[in-house]
Image (cartoon, helix red, strand yellow):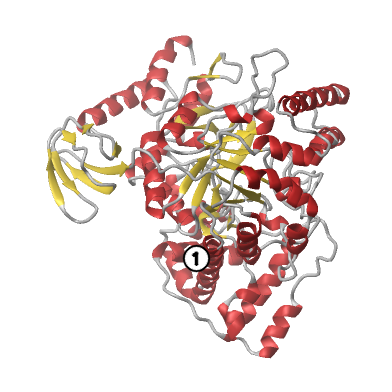
Amino acid sequence: MTSHDLDPLRRLAEAHGVATSYEGSDREMVTVDPDLVVAVLARLDVDASTPESIERELARHEEERKRRSLPSTIAATHGVARPLGVSGVLHLEDGTTREIGHELPADVPLGYHRLVTEEQEVAVVVGPARLPDVPRTWGWMLQLYALHSKDSWGMGDYGDLAAFARRAGKEQGAGVLLVNPVQAFVPSAPLERSPYSPSSRRYANPLYLRITDTGAFAAADDDIRARIVALAPDSGNDDLVDYDAVWNAKRAALELLWEQDPQVGPIDTDLTMFATAMALAEEHGPDWREWPEEYRDPANDAVEEARRALAPRIAFHAWVQQLCARQLDSARAAAHEAGMPVGIVHDLPVGVHPGGADAWALQDAFASDIRVGAPADAFNPLGQDWGLPPWRPDRLAETGYAPFRDVVRSVLRHADGIRVDHIAGLWRLWWIPPGEPAHRGTYVHYDADVMLAILMLEAIRAEAIVVGEDLGTVEDVVTDTMHERGILSSAVLWFERDWDAPGQPHVRPQAWEPETMASISTHDLPTVAGWLQDERVRVQSELDLLDEPVEDAMARAAEDRKALLALLDEEGIADDDPVVALHAVIAPAASRLVLSSPADAVGQVRQPNLPGTVDEYPNWRIRLPVDLDAFFADDRVRSAVAPLRDARPAR
């Protein structure tokens, strides 16, 4: 495309929220290749392939703009009037109606409403101005699969989560637990290990079910219970989770219980659709894109016929989800009984597996052949490709953002809070067109006002907190808006430095932004013990993942250690035991929440996940070296959390 064509293309792209340039991680403007802009627009059903088609699309957009004075969905803030420019009838969520002039009054209640004008019908989301203040407390960020106890089968489960919540609250005075995503898996073999690539973000992962805690197990006869107990996989002293062995055992146990007493509760339309996808996956493979053609569209008659034929399996998968819901609720209740002022916070991944249940059931809402990721930066010079399909912003607006609302609501149904992975995605997402590498993409913008209104409205109704993961290259508007609205951002000790000062010294935790959830590290970074031993550099070198000589990487790691030890010295904290020292340095942070990880507290060396790897490193499989009982009796753990407990009493 010639430079003469760029201005119409730029105008067309802007009309559809597609960036033709953006600010890179080095604060320099990057111009997007016009061919990439054309490819992304095509995934929004906008033809920009020729100058003539661009002019036609611009004319069509202008005609649509004149016909519809408002977007399909708009947001308003409770207590603040919103100009509309049109009059109409507001149909409130409670069934009543109000005549509206040219503005939405400030007293319109929180909720999901409809505005009907002469020209159009508009979805109206009224959200709160700000969420309530988050209690100042401390807690744990758990990789649930890494826990294990005498009652769990080879990996942590919902029973372990309940036990951890109960004991952390009562014995340690912890006030919050952040849990890795526990959304439904893709039923493949081998199983997808990453919790950030679920089949569905609306349903739970049955891998975490504790079979022996189900009502069906309690009601079974002695013979069945004995057969089920005998199925438990022998994990012995294994330090890695074998997901396939765990699922094979639990699936066999669930099948036995289902055969004895197939008692399933009411199944709504969404659960039926999810269970149908699971049943079809059993018949035709885990990826719906490879199913026979007639089953790829959930609206096809063949799918309805299959639903009738597969009714017993659909009921089975719905029943399994009902078991998961009960155990998730039990874990949440355990946190409440332990007096936790916040409770359990569940993690929401940025997307779903492209071949999974949500991508099949909601394919009209996804740009199915686009992958989400991140542009090139200093840490990832080739960009990042997460392999997840993004929402189409136009389709979200047309549906009143119902798919997004349903995802948030489903997580909060069993939670006291939600952590939104890559919360910057509410503003914009990096779209990578088919056939392109990760760094060749562009940003597509979303209506952050609407998405924030939904997120906050659902949180208010669930009496839950909201945390956003805003690490990496994030626009200032994202973090600033979060703090204004009572959403916590992320503060990580490794990164809280004055990057413009000589030596890049660490910022004192007492000076950190209060509206944050703080931690020493994250699941994508070294543990404290690993950091002290340069474990990450060693592993990256062995796997040929370093983009510099190993000596240079070691030298930089040494400089990072020196900077952090200088902070300890400045705070007057002895570094005889680095694990205790680092907990002591973040304990008085200005942050509302301060979290530790069990892996740090027990001195585990390997980090949970090594970005840039799939099978080269045992991502999301590393178990804690101690079981649950030993963890709570461990002197290292008691010493590590003592500063947190002293600085942040739970009650």
Q: Is residue 420 above or below residue 6?
A: below
Query: 579 or 118: nearer the eye?
Result: 579
Q: Is residue 15 above or below residue 161?
A: above
- Where does residue 45 sit, x and y in percent of width and height? 41, 35
Query: 47 or 544: nearer the eye?
Result: 544
Q: Is residue 428 left or right of residue 178?
A: left
Q: Is residue 265 visible?
A: yes
Q: Hey, what amino acid is under mark 1?
A: Thr
> In the rendered image, which quarter is residue 633 located in?
bottom right
Q: Is residue 119 left or right of residue 603?
A: left
Q: Is residue 502 above or below residue 162?
A: above
Residue at image location 87% in from the left, 36% down from the top: 542
Label 1 crowding class (10 Å Cα cut-off): few <14, some 14-19, many 20+? many
> In the rendered image, which quarter is residue 470 located in?
top right
Query: 634 or 36: nearer the eye?
Result: 634
Total count of labels: 1
Q: Is residue 576 left or right of residue 267?
A: right
Residue beneath disc 1: 276
- Where does residue 396 sit, x and y in percent of width and height? 38, 43
- Where does residue 387 sit, x and y in percent of width and height? 61, 41
- Where does residue 243 sit, x and y in percent of width and height? 72, 60
> In the rendered image, which quarter is residue 117 located in?
top left
